[in-house]
Amino acid sequence: KSADLSKIEAVRSSIQCLSTRMRVSIHKIDNICLTINKLRDEELWSKMKELIHRLSKMWSSMLECHSRQSRVIAEAEKLDKMTLKEN
């Protein structure tokens, strides 16, 4: 019986040690999650908003450029048709 009690005590001690290590690990994971969320909220989101703003400006600029190109091409085609009719 004393051998069984010592085995039970050893297992109990081992479980208690593992439980403590798990609580410490969970606490570390919680802190890491908080840090990640803080980085996301304070740094990443502002950078994403800036990126979206700049991309929007870029696409607006490209739209304007392509619109001008389209108008120039249309005018060139009109001139081309006019010169073909004259000949």
Image (tube, rainbow, N blue to C red):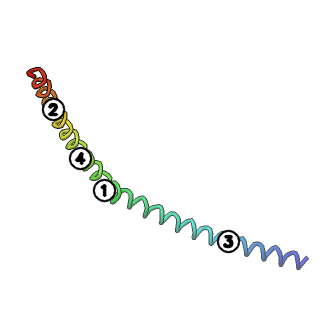
Could you tell me the amino acid type at mark 3?
Answer: Leu
* Image position of 30 (left or right of 52): right
The alpha-carbon separation of the residues under discs 3 and 2 comes to 74 Å
Position above or below: 48 against 16: above
Nearest-to-viewer mark from 3 and 2? 2
- Camera-side residue of 35 and 45: 45
- Lower position in the chain sequence, tag 4 or tag 2: 4
User: Which residue position holds label 1?
Assistant: 47
Nearest-to-viewer mark from 1 and 4? 4
User: Which residue position holds label 3?
Assistant: 18
**Circles 1, 4 touching at the beta carbon (< 8 Å):** no
User: Which residue position holds label 4?
Assistant: 58
* Image position of 67 (left or right of 87): right
x and y, in percent, of residue 20 in the image? 63, 71
Element at badge 4? helix
Nearest-to-viewer mark from 3 and 4? 4
The alpha-carbon separation of the residues under discs 4 and 2 comes to 20 Å
Element at badge 2? helix
Element at badge 1? helix
- Lower position in the chain sequence, tag 1 or tag 4: 1
